[in-house]
């Protein structure tokens, strides 16, 4: 049964100038969106794509400043999240609606449904970052510029050249995931865990409850958790990955709720957390308590399923050629979790990279932890790249 609701956010729960509504993308999906800058004639459009476990609400501190700069700003709950279609999905249901390229189709359908042929920028954070990147790969005619946040884009698949004349080298064995499990303190990669059948129930029905799970999870991945001191890793191997915190490279015998529970901040620390008040966190927890997490977890599952590889190979060797920028928190391990991705993004994947910025005082949730610094970077980029025909 579908678990989204067709009830928009109450206006009393939103800042003046932001509205909530539903838009049919004509891709078998209705998206709940937050909008700003919708009431002053024709404006260039900007799309803001959130990550996991987040919502359109994650962009609450960006929407009004971007609208005040002259843009129509649109932030959807992605398919499977919040009040959009797809939250009622089960583990055994069809995964194809949640593939990266179908999410590009959702995004393109949203653009067209809003009446635009072209948007000034697509901006993605966390899981929204690869969606935004693939938008720029597949339809650079529509997505005029790109901002990636927290998750570097290493590039499209490499072309499999000369395979008619040379045999392909078999994959090495054992895999890095098997090596993680064989460490003296056995570990596992969080993305592999998020692809398992039990992940949704583990966190939806965890002992501490959804609200406290999210508080600990957001805290542990933020700059408030002082143990976050990220740095480049030498290679994709178990001994290097094991240097990352337990929210990325988990203990083999623990689920994610158990992994973050020991780092639950104190009541005093929660009261002092200005970037995510308990009322703000309640927006997230209320949605996830209602829907569960499977709609978001489907995005992790498609990564490991071979049937979805051919669709990305259609773009093998293609680069992102629109103006691009990368933003992350200086305390964000997401920058380095896949060794070489941060460097490849700058040297080969994006041919018009205008800047990479690691923001002081922020971890993984950079646009929430340091909204003013993030907004300054976004506005400077948009002033440099946005054109009058980006509508």
Image (spheres, grey):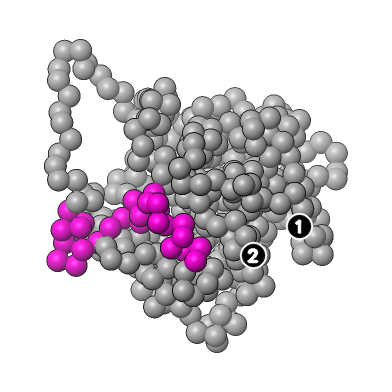
Residue 75 in view in this figure = no
Considering the numbered disc 1 on the image, is that residue within a helix, a strand or a loop? loop
Residue found 81% across the figure and 44% down from its top: 38
Residue 172 in which image quadrant: top left
Residue found 21% across the figure and 63% down from its top: 186
Image position of 14 (left or right of 321): right
Q: Position of residue 318 (x, y in %)?
A: 41, 25
Residue 9: which disc?
1
Residue sticking out furthest to the right: 40
User: Counting other residues with Cα less than 10 Å from the Cα at mark 2, is it few (<14), some (14-19), or many (20 or more)?
Assistant: few
Image position of 238 (left or right of 349): left
Select label 2 or label 1 by which is in front. Answer: 2
Residue 32 in view in this figure = yes
User: Counting other residues with Cα less than 10 Å from the Cα at mark 1, is it few (<14), some (14-19), or many (20 or more)?
Assistant: some
Residue 165 in which image quadrant: top left
Considering the numbered disc 2 on the image, is that residue within a helix, a strand or a loop? helix
Residue 286: which disc?
2
Residue sticking out furthest to the bottom: 268
Q: Is residue 65 magenta?
A: no
Please report the bounds of the magenta region as a residue range.
179-205
Q: Is residue 180 magenta?
A: yes
Residue 254: which disc?
none
């Amino acid at each position: 049964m579908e678990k989204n609701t067709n009830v928009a956010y109450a206006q009393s729960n939103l800042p003046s100038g932001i509205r909530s509504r539903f838009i049919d993308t004509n891709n078998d999906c209705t998206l709940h969106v937050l909008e700003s800058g919708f009431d002053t004639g024709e404006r260039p459009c900007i799309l803001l794509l959130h990550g996991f476990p987040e919502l359109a609400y994650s962009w609450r501190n960006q929407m009004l400043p971007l609208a005040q700069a002259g843009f129509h700003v649109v932030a959807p709950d992605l398919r499977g999240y919040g009040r959009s279609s797809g939250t009622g999905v089960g583990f055994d249901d069809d995964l194809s609606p949640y593939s990266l390229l179908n999410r590009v189709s959702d995004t393109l359908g949203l653009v067209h449904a809003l009446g635009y042929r072209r948007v000034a920028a697509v901006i993605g954070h966390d899981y929204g970052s690869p969606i935004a990147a693939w938008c720029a790969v597949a339809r650079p005619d529509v997505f005029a510029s790109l901002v990636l946040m927290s998750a570097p884009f290493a590039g499209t698949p490499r072309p499999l050249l000369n395979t008619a004349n040379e045999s392909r080298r078999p994959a090495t064995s054992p895999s890095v995931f098997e090596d993680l499990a064989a460490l003296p303190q056995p570990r596992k990669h969080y993305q592999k865990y998020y692809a398992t059948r039990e992940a949704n129930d583990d966190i939806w029905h965890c002992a501490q409850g959804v609200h406290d799970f999210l508080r600990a999870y957001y805290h542990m991945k933020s700059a408030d958790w002082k143990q976050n001191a990220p740095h480049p890793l030498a290679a994709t191997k178990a001994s290097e990955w094991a240097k990352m915190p337990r929210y990325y490279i988990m203990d083999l015998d623990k689920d994610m709720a158990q992994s973050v529970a020991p780092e639950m901040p104190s009541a005093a620390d929660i009261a002092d957390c200005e970037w995510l008040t308990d009322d703000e966190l309640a927006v997230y927890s209320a949605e996830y308590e209602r829907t569960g997490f499977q709609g978001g977890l489907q995005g992790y599952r498609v990564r490991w399923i071979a049937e979805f590889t051919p669709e990305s190979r259609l773009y093998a060797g293609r680069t992102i050629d629109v103006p691009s920028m990368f933003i992350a928190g200086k305390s964000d391990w997401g920058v380095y979790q896949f060794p070489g991705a941060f460097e490849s993004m700058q040297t080969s994947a994006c041919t018009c990279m205008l800047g990479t910025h690691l923001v002081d005082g922020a971890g993984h949730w950079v646009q929430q932890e340091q909204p003013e610094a993030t907004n300054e970077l976004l506005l400077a980029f948009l002033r440099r790249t946005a054109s009058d025909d980006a509508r």
